[in-house]
């Protein structure tokens, strides 16, 4: 399951304004117009990341979707505890 908070680089306690700022910053970073000198591979990676950013914003900016995401995310069964702990650590200590 993708952690939308990690995609946007924000904490789960982020306010609506923080979510919007993170979305704008990352949308600008990965926008195709900003990648004029990039290779095709870099453009493809940026395009994929931009789609993740858009989806994360869509979910986290809607209170109902955000609450459902948090509920579902909290119920995920961890199959690789080391990876899960590393991801959690990276969220709070980037």
Image (spheres, rainbow, N blue to C red):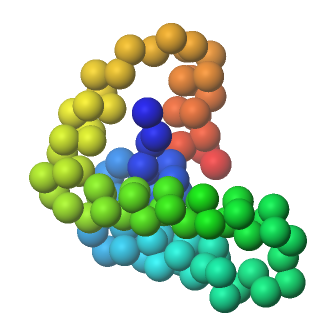
Q: Is residue 69 above or below residue 58?
A: above
> Viewed as shown, does residue 7 lie left or right of 41?
left
* Quadrant (top left, top right, bottom left, bottom right) of the N terminus: top left
- Is 34 left or right of 15, judged from the image as shown? right
Viewer-proximal residue among 68 and 46: 46
Q: Residue at x 74, y 70 (%)?
A: 43
Q: Residue at x 62, y 22 (%)?
A: 83
Instruction: Estimate the x, y position of residue 48 in percent, counting from the top left.
Output: 60, 59
Residue under the image location 26 percent in, 41 percent down: 69
86 horizontally vs 18: left or right = right
Q: Where residue 55 sits: x, y (%)?
A: 39, 58
Q: In this view, does 71 lie above or below 83?
A: below
- Against 2, residue 85 (above or below) is above
Location of residue 76 by image quarter: top left
The percent coordinates of residue 26 (x first, y second) are 56, 72
State the image quarter where residue 57 is shown: bottom left
Outermost residue toward the front in this view: 40
In this rendering, the answer to whether 36 lies above or below 17 is: below
Picture coordinates of residue 37 (x, y %)? 86, 84
- Residue sitting at 64 percent across and 48 percent down? 94
């Amino acid at each position: 399951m993708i952690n939308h908070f990690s995609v946007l680089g924000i904490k789960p306690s982020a306010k609506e304004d923080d979510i919007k700022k993170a979305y704008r910053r990352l949308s600008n970073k990965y926008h195709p117009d900003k990648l004029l000198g990039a290779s095709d591979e870099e453009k493809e990676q940026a395009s994929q990341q931009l789609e993740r950013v858009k989806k994360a914003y869509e979910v986290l900016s809607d209170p109902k979707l955000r609450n459902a995401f948090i509920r579902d995310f909290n119920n995920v069964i961890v199959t690789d505890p080391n990876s899960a702990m590393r991801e959690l650590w990276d969220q709070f200590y980037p």
